[in-house]
């Protein structure tokens, strides 16, 4: 990957009082992060409140029933229904886990090959670790929250809706599929939007993936409601939960990369001082 501001294609630059490791303005970044932190805490408060409400009122609301009936009563052609169901299918535990393992292994393998060839490899290693830790830990937290909230899944025998998948006897709030897709594809979109990738001459290949990622994020909620697996409020809760996890781990990723680059630069400066 070639970059005008980073011709060696390292992706990460030495942080200064003016620029971050990504080559962005530190002043603008600090202003943006203050807003992000404030919004994150507001979102967390809203999410906690919704979890408490769902715990004490697990039955579907009027908007849940009406939205499910509206989605399932739409007369769409079979081929379109199949396309709209793809996000739910590929983000089931299987093959979702295999896709994650393959991507993480790919990042780490590329990093290892570049390291052996004496090429910059830190970005690839960091990306693989970031993706694995973020998605795996968020999945575990989602499962724990589902159990704590304890909202039962839609039941066609009680709620008079269609269920197009086997009934899963597992709590439903917040939606694990919606949460997983926000975290998984959000991580990949974040990694694909850094300065080095944007200036790659084959960036059009990345754009194709980005278009699918956006489609998946927008469609996963619809597909879960259409299948009868989740209520609208489950999906909205999953989106919010995923966004909170995603931004938290992005903050950790930024902090970790900044710390690593600063530490490496400090060691290089010490070696130069000794050699000089």
Image (tube, rainbow, N blue to C red):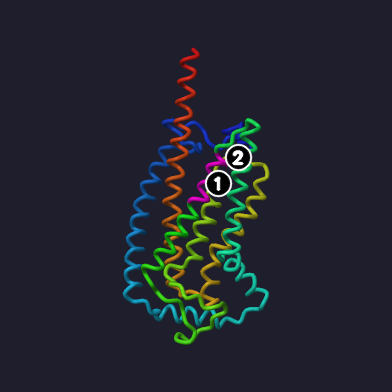
Q: Position of residue 101 (x, y in %)?
A: 59, 53
Position of residue 241 relative to residue 60, above or below, is above
Q: Are circles 2 and 1 on residues that touch, CB within 8 Å? A: yes
Q: Position of residue 22 (x, y in %)?
A: 50, 38
Which residue is pictured at 47% across the width and 25% down the height? 267
Of residues 241 and 96, the one drawn nearer to the viewer in this rendering: 96
| Mark 1 crowdedness (10 Å alpha carbons): few <14, some 14-19, many ≥20 | many
- Return the residue at label 1: 128
**41 horizontally vs 76: left or right:** left
Task: Tell me which label, 2 or 1, sits earlier in the chain.
Answer: 2
Position of residue 225 relative to residue 121, above or below, is below
Query: Which residues lie in the magenta part?
Result: 123-133
| Numbered disc 2: secondary structure | helix
Which circle marks residue 30 in the picture?
Answer: none
**178 horizontally vs 39: left or right:** right
Q: Main secondary structure of the magenta part?
A: helix
Q: Position of residue 62 (x, y in %)?
A: 40, 81
Q: Is residue 224 magenta?
A: no
Which residue is pictured at 63% across the width and 52% down the height? 207
Which circle marks residue 111 in the picture?
Answer: 2
The Cα–Cα distance between marks 2 and 1, rounded to whole angstroms, is 9 Å
């Amino acid at each position: 990957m070639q970059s005008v501001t980073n011709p060696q294609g390292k992706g990460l630059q030495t942080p200064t009082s003016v620029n971050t490791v990504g080559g962005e303005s530190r002043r603008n970044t600090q202003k943006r992060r203050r807003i992000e932190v404030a919004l994150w805490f507001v979102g967390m408060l809203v999410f906690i409140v919704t979890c408490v409400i769902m715990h004490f009122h697990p039955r579907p609301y009027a908007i849940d029933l009406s939205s499910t009936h509206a989605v399932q009563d739409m007369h769409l052609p079979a081929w379109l229904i199949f396309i709209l169901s793809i996000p739910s299918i590929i983000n089931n535990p299987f093959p979702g886990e295999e896709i994650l393992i393959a991507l993480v292994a790919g990042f780490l393998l590329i990093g290892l090959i570049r390291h052996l060839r004496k090429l910059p490899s830190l970005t690839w290693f960091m990306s693989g670790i970031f993706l694995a830790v973020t998605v795996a830990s968020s999945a575990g937290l989602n499962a724990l929250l589902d159990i704590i909230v304890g909202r039962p899944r839609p039941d066609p025998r009680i709620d008079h809706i269609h269920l197009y998948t086997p009934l899963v006897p597992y709590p439903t709030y917040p939606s694990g599929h919606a949460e997983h897709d926000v975290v998984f594809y959000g991580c990949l979109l974040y990694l694909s939007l850094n300065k080095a990738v944007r200036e790659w001459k084959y960036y059009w290949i990345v754009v194709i993936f980005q278009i699918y990622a956006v489609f998946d994020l927008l469609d996963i909620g619809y597909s879960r409601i259409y299948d009868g697996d989740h209520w609208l409020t489950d999906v909205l809760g999953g989106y919010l939960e995923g966004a909170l996890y995603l931004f938290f781990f992005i903050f950790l990723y930024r902090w970790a990369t900044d710390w690593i680059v600063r530490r490496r630069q400090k060691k290089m400066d010490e070696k130069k001082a000794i050699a000089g």
